[in-house]
Amino acid sequence: MAKNDKLKDAAVKIGSAVGKIDGTAHRTAHKAAEAVRAAKEELDALSKQVDALKKQLKESSKRLQSALK
């Protein structure tokens, strides 16, 4: 009977360790997904800023060309 108790204890410890690892992996994946989402939002915002700067540069270039004529 003592042998069965040791096996059960070992199985419980193994199951507990697997559960902890699974939970950690899930949380890590969730954090990584959040980081990717945040980086994408930042990249989108920077892209919009670059587009706005391109537009301003184009308009300024047109004004300068007309001023030089």
Image (cartoon, rainbow, N blue to C red):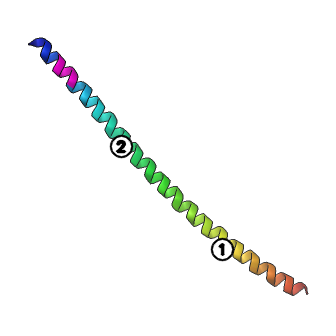
Name the amino acid type tagged 1.
Ala
SS type, badge 2: helix
Q: Are marks 1 and 2 in contact (CB under 8 Å)?
A: no
Q: Nearer the viewer, residue 12 or 53?
A: 12
Residue 49 placement (x, y as % from top left) = 63, 69
Name the image quarter holding residue 43: bottom right
Determine whether, in the image, residue 47 is placed left or right of residue 57.
left
Main SS, magenta residues: helix
Q: Earlier in the sequence, mark 1 or mark 2?
A: 2
| Residue shown at the point (21%, 23%) measured from the top left | 11
Name the residue rendered at 52%, 62% in the picture.
41
**30 drawn magenta:** no
Q: Is 24 rendered above or below residue 8?
A: below
Q: With respect to residue 60, does 13 lie above or below?
A: above
Residue at the image position 77 percent from the left and 79 percent from the top: 60
Where is residue 9? Give x, y as percent. 18, 21
- Specify the label residue 26 is tagged with: 2
How many numbered marks appear? 2
Query: Where does the magenta region start and end?
Result: 7-11
List the residue tagged with mark 1. Answer: 52
Secondary structure of residue under mark 1: helix
Quadrant of the drawing holding the N terminus: top left
Looking at the image, which is closer to me, 67 or 36?
Answer: 36
Q: Nearer the viewer, residue 56 or 26?
A: 26
| Quadrant for the C terminus in the image | bottom right
Q: Residue 9: within the magenta?
A: yes
Residue 7: mark: none
